[in-house]
Amino acid sequence: MGQFRADADRAFIEFSAIHNGDELVGLTRVGSLTLETTGLFGVLSDGDGDVRAIAMPGWATIPSFRDLATGRRWHFFFAWVFVINGLLYVGANLVNGHFRRDLLPTKSEIKPKHTLQDIWNHARLKLPKGEDAKRYRVLQKGAYLGVTILLLLMVLTGLTVSPGFNAGVPLAHLLEQAGLADNARYVVFHCADSYYASDDGSARYYESVDLHPQTILAHTMNDAPFKVAHGAPLRLRVERQLG
């Protein structure tokens, strides 16, 4: 842990790349075991045939390329798959009476004496037999209902993670007006804060971004001007790389 307990926890599984002379080597660490996995994990050839530090191959990720905006769309797509499946499950069990008949505890079952007895029977592995074994006990009912409600809440809360709708000007259009070179492909920007700064404060965090149409200088969020806390008056949005 760091001095202010703000450092990220050490990952149990980690993909990384190191330089071994002029060669770039991919490493995979699982716990205390480190393996060289160049060509599989850590270091791969990109679409242009260049060797780069890439954690995982394209076939193992959705999408197969680095694009957080597209990845977010896939995230919501699969979330809706689970939502629709969950709604069908809940609707079918409400119609056929399964919830009311088999999963909803009766008044006598939720009494403390009955619940404690059921817990005691399970602790002693004293399980029901015969016809009685065909019915859910109060602990089973609570577990099934709890898991069903929890899964629905997980999906619904996951659908609320959208950071908002931003409007702005594509960075490429603005740079064209400034006389951008025709062969320019990337832009390097330096942050104003001291994140990852050197001890003397001279170094600033920097990043290079491509000139994709989704890279914009945003000025509003949800149809309202940015507040200072959100980066007013302008905020660079790099959806394909930084989100």
Image: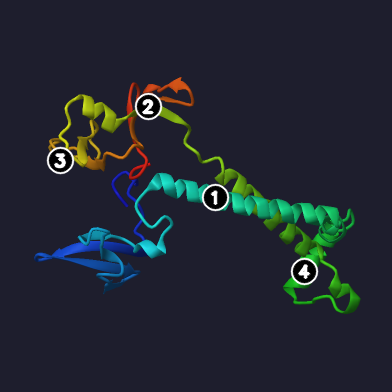
- Residue, disc 1: 77
Q: Are marks 1 and 2 in contact (CB under 8 Å)?
A: no
Q: CA distance from mark 2 to mark 4?
A: 63 Å
> Which residue is the site of mark 2?
168
Q: Callout 2: helix, strand or loop?
A: strand
Q: Which residue is located at x 75 percent, y 71 percent?
A: 122
Q: Quadrant of residue 236?
A: top left
Verify CB contact (< 8 Å) between mark 3 and mark 2: no
Where residue 242 sits, quadrant-wise, is top left
Direction bottom: furthest residue: 130
Q: Are marks 3 and 4 in contact (CB under 8 Å)?
A: no
Q: Helix, strand or loop at disc 1?
A: helix
Secondary structure, mark 3, is: loop
Of mark 1 and mark 2, the one earlier in the sequence is 1
Q: Earlier in the sequence, mark 3 or mark 4?
A: 4
The mark that comes first in sequence, 2 or 4, is 4
Whether label 1 touches label 3, CB < 8 Å: no
Image x and y of residue 112, in percent: 82, 56
Q: Quadrant of residue 182?
A: top left
Query: Which label is found at residue 199?
Result: 3
Q: Residues within 10 Å of mark 3 (few under 14, many from 20)?
A: few
Q: Describe residue 96's horizontal placement relative to residue 241 as left or right.
A: right
Q: Residue at x 48, y 33 (%)?
A: 164
Q: Amino acid at mark 4?
A: Trp
As measured in the structure, the alpha-carbon distance from the residue carrying label 3 to the one carrying label 2 is 35 Å
Question: In the image, residue 197 lies at what x, y percent?
Answer: 19, 39
Q: Residue tagged by mark 4?
A: 120
Give left or right: position of 20 versus 9. left
How far is the residue under mark 3 from the one under mark 4? 61 Å
* Mark 4 closeness class: few <14, some 14–19, many ≥20 residues within 10 Å: few
10 Å crowding of disc 2: few (<14), some (14-19), many (20+) = some
